[in-house]
Amino acid sequence: MTGITDSFARRTRSSLREALIDAAADILAVRGSAGLRMADVASAAGVSRQTVYNEFGTKNALVRAVVLRTTGEFLDGIHQRFASAPDLLDGIREAVTYTIEHARENRLVASALGTPQGEDLLPLLTTRGEPVLSAAMETAAAHYREFLPTLSTDAANLLAETVVRLSLSHLVLPTHSATEAADLVCAAVAPAITHYSSTME
């Protein structure tokens, strides 16, 4: 009975946490970080303000939780693109295209990139974006080594950092469609992939 009770409590807490993150994400997309109030998150989720503080502690921690969940959604999509790709370059192309398209469709990211109220969220992708960038680079490097198993860790990390930073540049300054941006990223890294592939034969 204790095990069943503990399992129910974990599910309930997980549901509460997700509801609070959902509410915070909706508010952040409209008002940005400066306009996020714990009381508003509590009201939107139908709980007390103290419940929000009990779960996250601070507003910054809540914002980080929203960012981490959003990052996880992007990484899941990237995993799926690489899983169905016939080769590394196609995987990179599909992953970059997905990242840019999904970012433009995601309310939170779109707000950070294109609205005055969301400007205070942009540093979470740029100057204070280390957790997001590191997660993206780690995921990318792991997939690159799956396609090229003898690719060194340093080479995979360098290639991943190049792709991620180029993708972010196209995302922040959107002068091309997602497909065009992906083609440009691939054109930039293709010589390196060819080099690494030829040295392994």
Image (cartoon, helix red, strand yellow):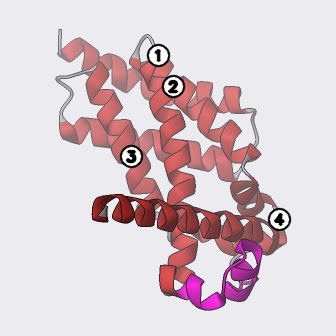
Circle count? 4
Q: CA distance from mark 1 to mark 2?
A: 6 Å
Q: Residue at x 80, y 75 (%)?
A: 31
Q: CA distance from mark 2 to mark 3?
A: 15 Å
Q: To which residue does mark 4 refer? A: 115
Q: Residue at x 34, y 30 (%)?
A: 143
Do the residues under discs 2 and 3 have CB atoms within 8 angstroms?
no
**Label 4 Cα neighbours within 10 Å, binned few <14 / some 14-19 / many ≥20:** some
Quarter of image, res 195: top left
Q: To which residue does mark 1 refer? A: 85
Indicate which label's residue lies in the foreground, 4 or 2: 2
The amino acid marked with disc number 2 is Arg
Indicate which label's residue lies in the foreground, 3 or 1: 1
Residue stretch rendered in magenta on the structure? 34-53
Q: To which residue does mark 2 refer? A: 81
x and y percentages locating residue 15 in the rendered image: 55, 61
Do the residues under discs 4 and 3 have CB atoms within 8 angstroms?
no
**Visible residue check, residue 120:** yes
Q: For this rendering, which residue is in front, 52 or 5?
A: 5
Q: CA distance from mark 4 to mark 3?
A: 27 Å
The amino acid marked with disc number 1 is Ala
The amino acid marked with disc number 4 is Thr
